[in-house]
Image (cartoon, rainbow, N blue to C red):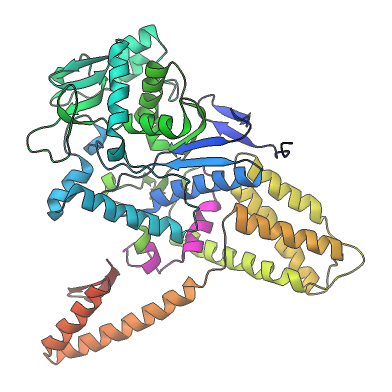
Amino acid sequence: MATEKLSVRLYNTLSGMKEGFRPLREDRVGMYVCGPTVYGEAHLGHARSAITFDIVYRVLKYAGYNVRYVRNFTDVGHLLNDADEGDDKVEKKALAENKEPQEVAQYYEAKYLWAVDSLNCLRPNLMPIASGHIMEQIDIVKALLDKGLAYESEGSVYFDVEKYNNTIKKYGVLSHRTLEDTKDNSRELAGQQEKHNPFDFALWKKAPKEHIMKWQSPWSLGFPGWHLECTAMGKKYLGEEFDIHGGGMDLLFPHHDCEIAQSVGAFGKMPAKYWLHNNMITIEGRKMGKSYNNFITITEMFSGTHHLLQKAYSPMTIRFFMLMAHYRSTLDFSNEALIASEKGFARLMEAKKKISSLPESKETSFPLKKIMEDAIDAVLDDFNTPICIANLFELCKHINSVADKKATISKEDKEYLEQNFNALCKDVLGLKEDNSGTDTKVVEGLMNLILEVRKSAREQKDYATSDKIRDALKEVGIEIKDSKEGAEWRLM
């Protein structure tokens, strides 16, 4: 007999409204999330997406669902400016560092996983990479060509957006753009003359001679278009139809609209029933991202080495900061908000520790179950973590009152409180005891001492000792930068 599931509601970008969650299959929920392009360190924007869909994953599991969670790595085909012309992001990084593209991709995959592991994000069930699924992508291109929804041009293959729009399904159903909107906003870029229309997008690109990452195909020696990889991997691991497709708001158009067009064109089916998008992190009102050169890496957050940071912040402080805003709202970076999150997280953990030692009474003098039910209902209602946390803070107030003998709690209710408070904090919100703040202070103290010793050596013109300290730190992953203002350190 199937276990009864808790009722979950979520905001579906496709319909533009909240809907009750009804999975396609009784035995398993399929969730695909667009992962990072691995050509640089993970920044706060990546952290927000990872934490958002970690919460979705945790809440669905908490509600009783068996979830297969797939998140990809993009290591080929994502060109600069998300266009169909220009340099591949991973390849450009490889050339700049005189490395193989796979070297670059694997290094930043590992860095990304370290970062999101530190933030206590559960790992997906599967983490496929784009370059490992070239044949699956070629098969989809063949299917679209066979159906007349794609065309070959000078060794490249493009999706015919206008034909799809006029004969199969309206293009832009997710972003709610019309084809006329798309036409008006399409950029005329160099190398676009081989397309029927500037808004057609690449399924397969013929590689220039100097291009490193290329594979043999029926059309040319080349590489797949960026949008194609998610269609191929989603289908392979979750089927032609699955429950949830997630990603950042910046992927909604054109990436996800293109995914829908490819899937409907090739298989005659919408790939996902529900589309979820987390909003952006901003700095002074502008989206944080590598293309704007205003991002703060997660490593810099942990070490406090970015010029916008007043101090280092622990992983749980960063996670709590993210959870204090609803995933669909814009979250503006500020040290004030992070410091408030640090204090709020500490307050929550302190109250959590007190529960087991609370004095027991015959009855409970506050509306415990109502507050707890409101906290649980919040995360089940479109993953509303700030409302959940607000209710947990309300419980903290009552926990402290009981500890101070200004309120009472029965033995039965104390057990209920401990079980559910712990479950919400640990299993649903992914919050855990965080001693890294103490560790950070120790590291900062030691590094300041080391830099003082090195400074003294330099002042005495003992450059051999100064260089020895710098080189020894570099070997353990710490870089020293000298300037007129003095020496600074950062994790490499």
Foreground residue among 414 and 284: 414
Q: In the figure, residue 152 lies in which quadrant?
A: top left
Regarding residue 258, the answer to whether it shows in the image is: yes
Direction from residue 455 to residue 191 in the image, left or right: left
Q: In the figure, residue 393 lies in which quadrant?
A: bottom right
312 magenta-colored? yes
Q: Residue at x 27, y 26 (%)?
A: 138
Stretch in magenta? 301-328
Name the spot of residue 272 as percent of width and height, x first. 49, 27
Q: Quadrant of the N terminus?
A: top right
356 magenta-colored? no
Regarding residue 384, the answer to whether it shows in the image is: no
Name the spot of residue 201 as percent of width and height, x first. 26, 23
Direction from residue 33 to residue 362 in the image, left or right: right
Q: Quadrant of the C terminus?
A: bottom left
Name the spot of residue 322 as percent of width and height, x first. 50, 53
